[in-house]
Image (tube, rainbow, N blue to C red):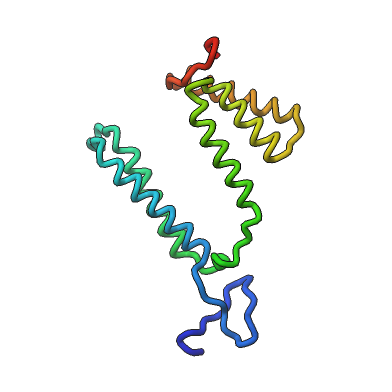
Amino acid sequence: MSINERPAMSGEVMPEGGIAPRGVRSDVVAGVVIVLIALLVGWENRRYPIGTLAEPGPGYLPLLIACALGVFGLLIALRAGTSPLFNTLDWSEGRRGMVMLVACGVAVFALERIGYRLTMIALLVFMLGVVERKRPVPTLLVAGGFALLSYFLFATLLKVQLPLGPWGI
């Protein structure tokens, strides 16, 4: 085996020459993106005081999460041996992912205007009913139940101030 050859990974088809295809693996790309997000969160977190272990400040937990995210991203990138090559990925679900991303962006802007509960109901009805094409009754039950239960959890039990919509909904 020469320097440019390597054994095939599991699930990989060996070409006629016996040399496994080379390129960047999808897990390497995902791991690097996760590490970059962790670095961005860590960089933005510098504005907040970290405090001490005994009395953590507002920047303590975000920094801790960014460090954990960075470590996991690095582990994903380093253990990418069996993932498919990035240039061979099937992007047929890319359009659906973009629709969901845009829907979440619209929900961010709708949150202050129509309130938490109505925004979550609208977002989940769209995601489940339109994007995933689920039946109407389960879609409405899941959307309404999630919106109401999550509002109860955050606003009532955890005392998080969530935006109210028209008529105090």
Q: Quadrant of residue 20?
A: bottom right
The reply, left or right, for residue 13 in relation to residue 53 is right
Q: Nearer the viewer, residue 139 or 87?
A: 87
Q: Residue furthest bottom?
A: 2
Q: How many marks?
A: 0
Q: Is residue 7 above or below residue 124?
A: below
**Image location of residue 9, percent across then percent down:** 57, 74
Q: Nearer the viewer, residue 91 or 43?
A: 91
Residue at the image point whose x is 23% and y is 37% from the top: 52
Residue at the image point whose x is 64% and y is 36% from the top: 127
**Image location of residue 128, percent across then percent down:** 67, 35
Q: Residue furthest top?
A: 167
**Image location of residue 86, percent across then percent down:** 54, 65
Residue at the image point whose x is 53% and y is 33% from the top: 106
The reply, left or right, for residue 17 in relation to residue 48 is right
Residue at the image point whose x is 47% and y is 20% from the top: 163
Q: Is residue 22 above or below residue 90?
A: below
The quarter of the picture where the C terminus appears is top right
**Image location of residue 159, percent across then percent down:** 43, 19
The reply, left or right, for residue 58 in relation to residue 98 is left
The reply, left or right, for residue 147 in relation to residue 80 is right
Q: Is residue 160 above or below residue 87?
A: above
Q: Quadrant of residue 142?
A: top right
